[in-house]
Amino acid sequence: MGGLPTSTVNGFAVSPTNAKVMYVAMRDGIFRSENAGETWARLTNSPRNVAAVTVNPKKPSELYAATMDGQIFRSADGGVRWDESR
């Protein structure tokens, strides 16, 4: 599992259209794997202290993340940009 920090995984999500695409929520941010967990890369602009991450089943490029302090973030482009939901 190259690229994933050794800290606790708080949440896990899998793309509904491609089971090789996975996301994990961690204190360091959100990490993505495109090869079923062989390697991982942190989504550069993702929020920190993430408690949960999910993928919209009807629109797999849309991600949602919840932080430990109760903020909700949304990405419409697979995790490239994140906006705080209000």
Image (cartoon, grey):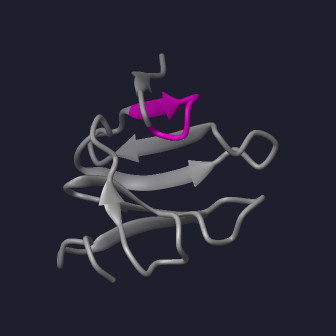
Q: In the rendered view, would you say 3 is above or below 81?
A: below
The residue at the point 77 percent across, 49 percent down is 57
Magenta span contains residue 58: no
The quarter of the image holding the N terminus is bottom left
Q: Which residues are magenta?
A: 72-79
The residue at the point 23 percent across, 50 percent down is 49
> Which residue reaches farthest right?
58
The residue at the point 53 percent across, 73 percent down is 35
The residue at the point 63 percent across, 49 percent down is 55
Estimate the x, y position of residue 27 in percent, counting from the top left: 21, 57
Front in this rendered view, residue 68 or 18 = 18
Q: In the rendered view, would you say 85 is above or below 35?
A: above
Estimate the x, y position of residue 39 in percent, counting from the top left: 37, 74
Magenta span contains residue 76: yes
**Quick check: 13 left or right of 42?**
right
Q: Which quadrant of the structure image shows residue 65?
A: top left
**Quick check: 79 left or right of 31?**
right
Estimate the x, y position of residue 8 in percent, counting from the top left: 25, 74
> Which residue reaches farthest top?
86
**Quick check: 61 left or right of 2?**
right
